[in-house]
């Protein structure tokens, strides 16, 4: 074997082992790499009970109730829901029906007391007219189904 | 480097010969620089004057015309750097290692740009400059890998040893690139998923056009800067060799 083929084999072998090691480590840490838990995770008691964590999902339309700086809303993943209570300034993109990530902890009543609320943006970029057209189309689809 | 004569059948090795590579690089640089300037002006015009406002984010979304090309380049250049460093390690070609070295600063700049523009987008959209989600953290690691590669190269005096040490770091760090790319898919992250996917783009066409023009501008810029850096370094090494030329020659023949 020529030295250069040997080096190439060593490097490819080394990278393959490294890749497998990385895959194993990442799958082992799967749960810890999660930035937020979904309401279903919380209902299934997968979220940590004694420490702060983040909950993410959509703001349920019609659930936002403001009282001064106090805001109450419901986070949903369309299967389960979690009520969230927060006192503070919300980001501009906080909207009903849009993504949100709240940091905080559950109180004994099962209400999520948030210390920080972040808006999660989706990957869709479109002009307002197009967004309006999509909305209209969805409305039309819903009325057709009824 | 003598591969050009040793392996006439393998055409690619022709360009590994410095005698062929440097004149070609010298001719490519002005063209790439020109293309980069023209495309950047056109892309910025499309991005800031032609592309419509976003329905959700308003004007702040326009950061994607810098942010996305920079982030893509940062990831892609790391693979290029690891590729050249690996080739240098296997075939012991100095030119490949010099290419890897020349890529690193541009890659670091791109990673920094992506993080910096992302932070200023994150404040108004998410409500935070920085969060420790998988996408952001792995991109920060990418910046540190670039800086670590440059620091390691600079810290070792013997260029051959520096190349080898750097190559190992570059190759090991390459595992981070697919992690960055797929992080938004594998884990819950605050960073949104990819808008450009094999199945199509979830982005209005004028926005996409402007972004892709900027991507090509960044490509042309990166090629121009990296080739310039390689040429400058080679001239510096030659000048240094010429300065110590006669004495070095005597030392070599009379140990």
Image: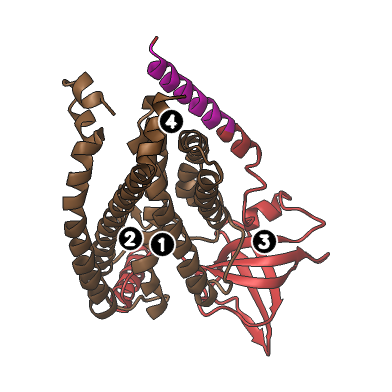
**Chain B drawn in what color?**
brown
Report in which chain the residue with disc 1 lies: A
Residue B215: within the magenta? no
- Mark 2 near mark 4, Cβ–Cβ under 8 Å? no
- Tag 1, which secondary structure? loop
Give the distance between the C-alpha atoms of the residues marked 1 and 2, in whole angstroms. Answer: 7 Å
Most prominent secondary structure in the magenta stretch?
helix
Relative to B59, is A90 on the left or the right?
right
Marks 4, 3 in one chain: no
Whether residue B25 is visible, yes or no, is yes
Report the residue marked by disc 2. B202
**Chain A drawn in what color?**
red
Foreground residue among A86 and B78: B78
Q: Position of residue B216 (x, y in %)?
A: 25, 58
Which span of residues is magenta-colored?
A: A2-21
Residue A16: within the magenta? yes
- Mark 1 near mark 4, Cβ–Cβ under 8 Å? no
Marks 3, 1 in one chain: yes
Which quadrant does the N terminus of chain B fall into? top left
Report the residue marked by disc 3. A54
Q: Earlier in the sequence, mark 3 or mark 1?
A: 3
- Who's the residue at 41% across and 37% down the image? B85
Give the distance between the C-alpha atoms of the residues marked 3 and 1, in whole angstroms. Answer: 21 Å
Report the residue marked by disc 4. B251
Report the residue marked by disc 1. A123
- Who's the residue at 37% across and 76% down the image? B55
- Who's the residue at 39% across and 31% down the image? B250
């Amino acid at each position: 074997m020529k030295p250069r083929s040997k080096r190439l084999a060593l490097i490819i072998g080394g990278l393959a082992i490294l890749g497998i090691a990385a895959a194993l480590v990442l799958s082992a840490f799967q749960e810890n790499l999660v930035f937020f838990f979904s309401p279903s995770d919380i209902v299934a008691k997968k979220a940590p009970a004694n420490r702060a964590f983040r909950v993410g999902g959509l703001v349920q339309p019609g659930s936002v109730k403001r009282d001064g700086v106090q805001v109450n809303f419901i986070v949903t993943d369309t299967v389960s829901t979690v009520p969230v209570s927060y006192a503070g300034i919300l980001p501009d993109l906080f909207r009903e029906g849009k993504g949100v990530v709240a940091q905080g902890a559950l109180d004994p009543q099962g209400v999520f007391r948030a210390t920080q609320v972040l808006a999660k943006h989706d990957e869709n970029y479109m002009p307002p007219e197009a967004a309006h057209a999509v909305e209209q189309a969805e409305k039309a689809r819903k009325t057709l189904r009824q | 480097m003598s591969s050009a004569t040793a392996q006439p059948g393998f055409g690619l090795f022709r360009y590994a010969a410095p005698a062929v590579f440097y004149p070609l690089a010298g001719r490519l640089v002005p063209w790439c620089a020109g293309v980069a300037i023209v495309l950047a002006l056109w892309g910025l015009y499309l991005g800031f004057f032609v592309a419509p406002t976003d329905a959700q984010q308003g004007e702040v979304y326009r950061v994607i015309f810098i942010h996305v090309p920079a982030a893509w380049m940062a990831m892609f250049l790391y693979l290029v750097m690891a590729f050249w460093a690996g080739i240098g390690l296997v075939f012991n070609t100095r030119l490949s290692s010099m290419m890897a070295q020349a890529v690193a600063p541009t890659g670091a700049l791109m990673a920094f740009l992506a993080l910096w523009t992302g932070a200023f987008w994150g404040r108004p959209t998410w409500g935070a400059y920085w969060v420790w989600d998988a996408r952001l953290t792995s991109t920060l690691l990418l910046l540190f890998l670039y800086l670590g590669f440059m620091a390691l190269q600079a810290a070792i005096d013997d260029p051959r040893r520096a190349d080898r040490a750097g190559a190992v770091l570059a190759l090991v760090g390459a595992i981070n690139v697919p992690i960055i790319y797929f992080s938004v898919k594998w884990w819950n992250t605050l960073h949104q998923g990819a808008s450009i996917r094999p199945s199509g783009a979830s982005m209005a066409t004028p926005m996409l056009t402007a972004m892709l023009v900027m991507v090509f501008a960044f490509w042309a810029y990166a090629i121009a800067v990296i080739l310039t850096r390689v040429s400058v370094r080679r001239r510096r090494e030659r000048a240094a060799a010429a300065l110590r030329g006669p004495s070095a020659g005597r030392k070599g023949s009379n140990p």
